[in-house]
Image (tube, helix red, strand yellow):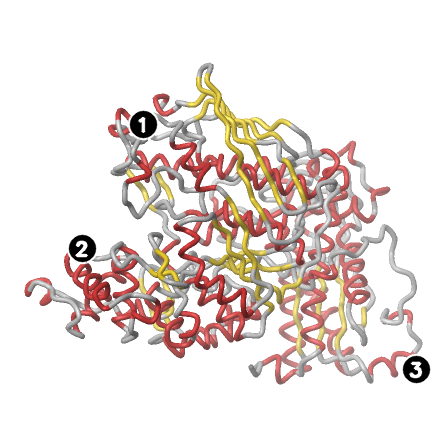
Amino acid sequence: MRKLVVIDRLDVGPVQLTKRRMTAPYSVKVGKKRESIDFIYRFEEDVFDPSDPTSRNLASIMAAQVAMNYGLFCRTIVFHGEYDDTDKRFISDMTENTCREIYVKKLLEPNPFLTGEAYRLKPVKRKRYCMAKLLFEGSAAKQERAGWKLRTSDPDSHAVLSSGGKDSLLSFGLLDELGMRVNPVFVNESGRHWFTALNAYRHLKDNLPRTSRVWVNSDRVFSWMLRQIPFIRKDFASMRADEYPIRLWTVAVFLFGVLPIVLSRGIGRIVIGDEHDTTQKSSFKGISHYNGLYDQSIYFDSAMSRYFMRKGWSVCQFSMLRPLSEMLIEKILALRYPKLQRHQISCHAAHKDGDRFKPCGKCEKCRRIVGMLSAIDVDPSGCGYSREQILNCLAGIAKKGVHQESDGAKHLEYLLSERDLIDLPPEKRRNLKPAPGIMKLRFDSNISPVDGIPVDLRVPLYSIYLEYAEGALQKTGRRWEEFDVLTDPSISAPYAFEPAAADLLDMEIEKVEPVHRDFIWGEMTWPEAEERLRKVDIALLPVGSVEQHGPHLPLDNDAFDAEYLARRIADACSHPKPLVLPLIPYGVSYEHDDFKGTVGVSNDALSRFVYDIGMSVARNGINKLVIINGHGGNNAALNYASQMITRDARIFVCVDTGETSDVDIYRLIETPNDIHAGEIETSTSLAVRPHLVRMDKAVRAVPRFSSKYLNFTSKRGISWHAHTKRISKSGVLGDPTRATAEKGEIFWKIMIAHLVALVEDLKSITLEEIYQRKY
């Protein structure tokens, strides 16, 4: 693989910034020879503040994206700019991933652009494939000293990464129909690629002022880099092919071009258009990879959303189209939004014809589009194909086929053959079979989960899809089974990457308990309680524990946290606020009995006590009881009590032990199996009670188990119990040395925001609506 290292050094940046432009020099050194080119993004509106370190940081990250394709070919890549630790980790991880993808898809698999020794590589299994040493020169010190802060954003505001193709047009049409604030953003260079987008861009720009264009010269930089690599054919620019010679980290170049607009406009969601089959895991001679589609996969969406959250940008990224096949996308676009479909061009060799741009009618993409439209009985001439081109494309399908998921290609040939639109050999025609799953919604827990998009979009979007699909399927094991998505419990499951009530997350975290509030049950007189209970039917019951929390945290940690959280939730809710019941300080803590100071009660005692409280508040008029549990060991008792209260009082009762927020918090922490007195609990204590934290006594004790299914924070982990001292002599299960007050503030804000959202939902609906929500 050392033969691939043909560039001594690639320098990126530092950036030069104006309000509407970012320029980053790229400089390549080979021996004594050095060449340079400028990488540029240009905007139609003010998006940067050159004096602001956060703008310079964003620009530095944008500048790095093209370079992340060349880790296989450089000895050293130096990123000059203002990068924080989150950026460095992201760039390093994604460069490594891209090296592996390029190694398999561009160097080991057939590639007509290669020549010389690179054309005859043998597969090598390695732990790491990036050959370059990545260096970061510069500092983000000013930004890091300022601390983490979550930007507020509007979750109803969506940026659609737009190209003029079917996916982005359908995404726009759907969001616009649902009444969302849609911002189509076209990121492209001048030339053939821009021809593809121009029809749609002009149409949307004329009708929607929020439409934007970002000009970027990445294609020129990519071509310039190819000329620095001697085993790429010199005539690469004149070769006709449907794939790029080397690069595979491309979508991110466009995506990061959208970010300045997203952040300056306060947009909360980035929508990209990727269908079902773009998420793939494959293996080539034992080398695992994503089949060259990582930056179009749901794994990429998740990685970007986690990165945004770590940066404090309050932005999530997703595709609404993952349950859909390419043909189903084309069908919905053409039949539901024909005025938009008219502007579709999915051809990178488009040409100008009068005041419109039209597809070439010769390439594989044109064959595919013409075939799909013809198969669903939609005239392809509506989006620019001539009669001659249509016939040639259909003939091409019969001879050459299309580059599509195998079932999609089979079903397309079947439909076209059934309509006598293609002439297949008799033997092939006899063996044709439909692949009906292609025209159904396909939900897979890994690549197209029901809860893979925000909650508010699910029912309206899936309802629209079902008007055109032939049903829905869910993958169970290796089988696809019929599935009613609209009644499945996951239709209302929390969305992992969008903190609820994000506008609450700029609150200041108090380092003392709140002063007297009229929502505190125990501080009211009985006439005040009588008056409040006429207006409020929801109460919060904090339950904690008194138990060891390592040598550095106080014994009442769980009790304090539960009460503090309950009070902050109520304080942040709208009027009338939920009532906060007095704390139950003791919990089920037998697992910590080996450590002095632990005071626990039995499951029977706690469940009976909570049951009596629940029955009593129900008699007071409470219809919804939310138990805020500060200690995981209480779960069995609280869930049993909740079940019995529901049975006997016929009110709604739920228990939250972090379920609403853990999915977000676990994505932010550095420690696996962090469940007790570790990074999370120490951080939250440092944020609100720093005077009770003895960081000088904090010790790291991260448990490691013999089976991954025993890991406490694993999504696939089983529930099991043990005496803590058998696992940790210090009582710590995690790494408190990684804790900071800044992290604690983030964790508190996420927990408060999610639970406020839950309580606000419960306040606004009746018991009957809880059991069967009417849409």
What amino acid does circle 3 point to? Pro
Q: Is residue 727 visible?
A: no
Assign a secondary structure to mark 1. Answer: loop
Dot 2 corresponds to which residue?
A: 400
Could you tell me which residue is drawn at 67 percent across and 42 percent down? 18
Q: Nearer the viewer, mark 3 or mark 2?
A: 2
Q: Are marks 1 and 2 in contact (CB under 8 Å)?
A: no
Question: Which image quarter: residue 758?
Answer: bottom right
Dot 1 corresponds to which residue?
A: 231
Q: Residue 290: percent from the left, percent from the top?
A: 38, 45
Alpha-carbon neighbours of circle 2 within 10 Å: few (<14), some, or many (≥20)? Answer: few
Assign a secondary structure to mark 3. Answer: helix
| 100 with respect to 416 (left or right) | right
Q: Residue furthest top?
A: 32
Q: CA separation, marks 1 and 2?
A: 29 Å
What amino acid does circle 2 point to? Lys
Assign a secondary structure to mark 2. Answer: helix
Q: Quadrant of the image for the C terminus?
A: bottom right
Q: Residue 103: percent from the left, percent from the top?
A: 35, 34
What amino acid does circle 1 point to? Phe
